[in-house]
Amino acid sequence: MIVLAVESSAHTFGIGIFDGKNKKIVANARDVFSTEQGGMIPTKVAEHHIAVKEKVLAQALKEADLEMKDISLISYTQGPGLAPALLVGRDFAVALAEEHKIKLLGVNHIAAHLEIGLFCTKAKDPIFLFCSGANTQVIVHEDKYRIFGEALSIAVGNALDKFAREIGLGFPGGPKVEALAKKGKYVALPYSVKGMDVDFSGIVTRAVQLYKKGVAKEDLCFSLQETCFAMLIEVTERALAHCEKKEVLLIGGVAANKRFAEMLDAMCSQRGAKAYIVPLMYAGDQGAMIAYQGWLERKREQKEFDINPKWRVDEVSTFWK
Ligand code: AMP
Ligand code: MG
């Protein structure tokens, strides 16, 4: 069975193709909305997705050396995400499914991030540390995915993006903050862990204030990373102890950050646990993970093709496990 998928929940418009017979990702084409200055405006993102959708589809089919007639299932991101962006992907998936008479399934974007992490690494039963642009959650699979801790206001990716935007670095901010942090030294920022939850909004506010007072952006980038990542590692360590697990799997776009991986590795080796990091090309949003998730759920039937912008991963039935 070959699954083609549409991802459109945020900045990325992606088409992925998964070959179920050979258990292989055969295409992962994408086009990412970005800006030189300013952040991500949902309607602008939707316009971007509309402009690139046909091109990205053609690119994916070419990459896999396949045609639409070879596809036996289409999956799309039903949520969570930005409604205008989700709608573009949903409409495109529905149109393709109707035109080519292919079965269609809407899947949960976060479950797809978690499952592609398992698919790409040797992790078996980890604490998932999910850090993307819009979500930050510490997740464990029991009878379903359970959220042990999360960011109370903004996600860690969003915190980095917001700080970057405020100091004029453009979007996405994470990689720009990482590059500047290499030349920075530590200045104190608020550290905010509440039980198993973390709160990043105060840190960003303080970092922006310090920037306006003349503190070097390199130092602020370095300190923002050190503080945010230390908070996340603290709650992850507690989740490891509480759940008696021996593995952590870092996923989501922020998993691309080398310093984060290094800090996680250090904590895990001190505890005799193993840190897995999702490979870079599957860290951020992409269509391959939606295709793989569609394949996992291939036995399910779906009649209504909604979008669900606020769909939490702990509301998903993990019947495929
Ligand atoms: P996602 O929503 O999973 O696609 O992840 C996107 C988020 O990852 C954005 O907030 C980016 O700023 C962030 N990101 C991407 N690369 C890096 C990096 N090298 N360091 C930190 N954050 C990053
Ligand atoms: Mg994502």
Image (spheres, helix red, strand yellow):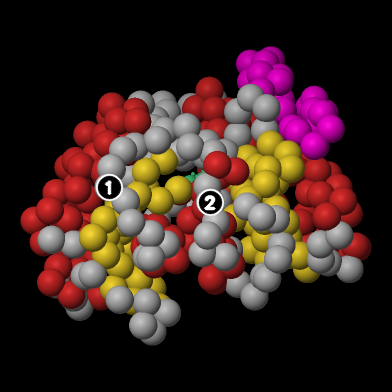
Residue at 76% x, 56% y is: 264
Residue at 67% x, 60% y is: 249
Identity of the residue furthest to the bottom in this view: 22
Above or below, comparing residue 249 to residue 217 in the picture: below
Judging from the image, what secondary structure is the residue with disc 1 in? loop
Give the x, y percent position of residue 115. 54, 62
Give the x, y percent position of residue 181. 66, 43
Is 188 magenta? The answer is yes
Which sits earlier in the primary sequence, circle 1 or circle 2? 1
Is residue 182 among what the camera can see? no
157 or 166, nearer to the observer: 157
Give the x, y percent position of residue 207. 68, 24
Specify start and end residues of the magenta stretch as a single range.
Answer: 186-215
Is 199 magenta? The answer is yes
Q: How far separated are the C-alphas under marks 1 and 2?
A: 17 Å
Q: Which residue is mark 2?
A: 317
Residue type, mark 2 in image: Ser
Quadrant occupied by the C terminus? bottom right
Task: Tell me where residue 155 sits by quadrant.
Answer: top right
- Residue 54 image label: none
Above or below, comparing residue 52 to residue 186 in the picture: below
Task: Tell me where residue 103 sits by quadrant.
Answer: bottom left
Is residue 64 among what the camera can see? yes
Q: Determine crowd level at label 2: few under 14, some 14-19, many 20+ residues with C-alpha closer than 10 A.
A: few
Q: Seen in the image, is 240 located left or right of residue 9?
A: right
